[in-house]
Image (cartoon, rainbow, N blue to C red):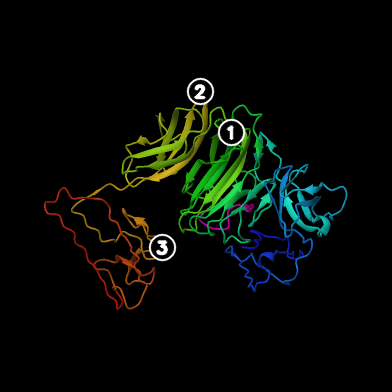
């Protein structure tokens, strides 16, 4: 490879002038060559690469440098790089405020004996700059000035306590950077998976996302309609100096409603590199857009650096589009005296028991757990004291019933945290006793069956089991009526692709009363293309 330009945009606007690339071909002198240009797509429609005015001729005595870039940018410095296309070993470098012409004095930074790379110092934080380079070829003279290349310095660290509720951010579907927060993005529509800023209440999609911000009007969200499984949307906080805090923490509110919700990874960097998954929140956490936002608290005492940056990574899991992850009210401040628990979950749910878990964000070793049927008003449920936050078992539940639970940390001496929740779960069906018969007459006729009367299917899209009466959705196939009664289950052959399987699961059936148990069922399979 003779030269590489990029990755990334080389101009900042469509009307910007074309840049000139000069490549030294002296290694091929006297030969006949073919020149190949290889462009690599980034997979989006906003990345057109153009070339023009090709010239193969004598190398200028002192060719211009090219391929300017800026790396390792801080709030006051930047490492400036370029490609030398001749034999120069010394260069002149000039840094100007963006839009100020080269040669304007005094420059922000200038050096006539620069090396490559060159570190520009004395810059202002959160500021756009242009830099230019000129090759010094000694007896062969000097090249023209090449540039500008535009870069932006980082924000200076903010000082805790720092509260960001995003109310001064602009609503956007292509968020990249504002107020020292940075986001990854791929497109100006929400067909890609990225962080956006909402100020209109709910997100653009229905049946996912919150109905409103945690407070105020604005919040960040990831649009579940975009991207593919495995995509990550990254949101970076500013650097925050927490040295003034005695017990530093970072807190944030999150809303994760939707059956297609993926994972929210929260990473911490104290200057020694990011520690991934300090907090990991997986799957749906709320049951409705109107459900309250949850709070997560991260104790930063284990991080030795005094300047902290938080990275929020939303990961798309699966193909369901109902997966809008939302974030609001990020706070760097003292760890609460009694931190509120977070990330409530349930596992090992049976017909009469469930194991409950949650994150402890402080030092509590005792918690008050209140639970009851869904719709529970706090203070009216059953309250028990838990001494573990991992797999706390509750029993005596009613089968096939939706339950909610709340958790409050007890930090001793009468000090209680705020109450986290509710989180919800549904108990399993109890086993039915054989002999057992099911004619499906009490089932709802639907083309979107998931679960009813202790029957369920894991397939919710494509080739699935559904409930019909008097015919299926297609002609020339299927029965005209049920075997008995009105209702029956069927699969719609026009959905899905060859090889797909649709599963229909019965309830648990206790056959202990039968001597020679057997299963019988009626079936109908008519059509010319089985």
**Tag 1's secondary structure?**
strand
Whole-Å distance between the Cαs marked 1 and 3?
43 Å
What is the spatial separation of the Cα atoms under label 2 and label 3, in whole angstroms? 51 Å
Dot 2 surroundings within 10 Å: few (below 14), some, or many (20 or more)?
A: few
Residue at far left of view:
515
Between 44 and 391, the one nearer to me in the picture: 44
Mark number, residue 249: 1
Q: Nearer the viewer, residue 467 or 178?
A: 178
Mark 1 and mark 2 lie on one chain; the one further toward the N terminus is: 1
Q: Quadrant of the C terminus?
A: bottom left
- In the rendering, which numbered label is found on residue 461? 3
Q: Residue at x 77, y 57 (%)?
A: 148
Residue 352 vs 518, above or below: the answer is above
How many discs appear?
3
Residue 201's place in the image compared with 375, above or below, is: below
In front of the other: 297 or 48: 48
Quadrant for residue 59, please give it.
bottom right
Of discs 1 and 2, which sits in the foreground?
Answer: 1
Q: Is residue 212 visible?
A: no
Label 1 to label 2: alpha-carbon separation? 23 Å
Report which residue position mark 2 lands on.
414
The mark that comes first in sequence, 2 or 3, is 2
Predominant SS of the magenta segment: loop
Which quadrant of the rendered structure holds the N terminus?
bottom right
User: Which residues make up the magenta segment?
Assistant: 197-207
């Amino acid at each position: 490879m003779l030269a590489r330009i990029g990755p990334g945009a080389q101009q900042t606007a469509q009307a910007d002038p074309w840049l000139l690339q000069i490549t030294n071909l002296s290694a091929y002198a006297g030969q006949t060559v073919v020149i190949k240009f290889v462009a690599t797509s980034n997979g989006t429609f906003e990345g057109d690469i153009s070339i023009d005015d090709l010239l193969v001729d004598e190398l200028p005595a002192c060719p211009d440098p090219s391929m300017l870039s800026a790396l390792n940018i801080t709030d006051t410095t930047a490492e400036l790089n370029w490609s030398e296309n001749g034999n120069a070993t010394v260069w002149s470098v000039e840094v100007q405020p963006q839009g100020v012409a080269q040669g304007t004095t005094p420059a922000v930074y200038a050096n006539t004996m620069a090396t490559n790379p060159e570190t520009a110092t004395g810059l202002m934080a959160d500021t756009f700059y242009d830099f230019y380079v000129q090759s010094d070829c000694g007896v062969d003279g000097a090249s023209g000035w090449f540039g500008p290349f535009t870069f932006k310095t980082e924000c200076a660290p903010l000082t805790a306590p720092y509260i960001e509720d995003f109310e001064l951010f602009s609503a956007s579907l292509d968020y990249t950077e504002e107020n020292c927060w940075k986001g990854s993005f791929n497109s100006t529509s929400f067909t890609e998976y990225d962080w956006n800023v909402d100020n209109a209440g709910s997100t653009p999609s229905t049946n996912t996302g919150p109905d409103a911000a945690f407070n105020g009007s604005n919040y960040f969200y990831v649009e579940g309609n975009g991207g593919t499984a495995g995509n990550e949307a990254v949101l970076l906080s500013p650097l925050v100096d927490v040295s003034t805090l005695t017990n530093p923490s970072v807190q944030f509110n999150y809303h994760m409603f939707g059956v297609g919700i993926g994972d929210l990874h929260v990473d911490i960097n104290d200057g020694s590199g990011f520690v991934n998954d300090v907090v990991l929140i997986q799957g749906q956490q709320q049951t409705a857009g109107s459900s309250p936002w949850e709070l997560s608290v991260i104790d930063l005492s284990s991080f030795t650096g005094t300047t902290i940056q938080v990275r929020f990574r939303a990961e798309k899991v699966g193909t369901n589009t109902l997966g809008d992850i939302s974030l609001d009210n990020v706070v760097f401040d003292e760890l609460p005296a009694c931190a509120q628990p977070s990330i409530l979950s349930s596992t090992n749910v049976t017909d009469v028991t469930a194991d409950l878990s949650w994150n402890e964000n402080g030092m509590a070793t005792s918690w008050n757990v209140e639970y009851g049927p869904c719709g529970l008003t706090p203070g009216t449920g059953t309250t028990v004291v838990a001494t573990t936050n991992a797999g706390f078992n509750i029993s005596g539940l009613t089968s096939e019933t939706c339950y909610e639970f709340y958790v409050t940390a007890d930090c001793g001496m009468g000090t209680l945290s705020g109450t986290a929740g509710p989180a919800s779960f549904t108990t399993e069906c109890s086993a039915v006793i054989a002999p057992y018969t099911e004619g499906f007459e009490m089932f709802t006729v639907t083309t979107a069956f998931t679960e009813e009367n202790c029957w369920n299917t894991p397939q919710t899209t494509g080739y699935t089991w559904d409930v019909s009466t008097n015919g299926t959705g297609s002609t020339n196939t299927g029965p005209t009526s049920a075997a008995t009664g009105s209702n029956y289950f069927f699969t719609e052959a026009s959905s899905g692709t060859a090889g797909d399987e649709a599963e229909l699961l019965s309830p648990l059936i206790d056959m202990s009363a039968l001597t020679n148990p057997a299963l019988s069922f009626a079936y109908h399979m008519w059509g010319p293309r089985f």
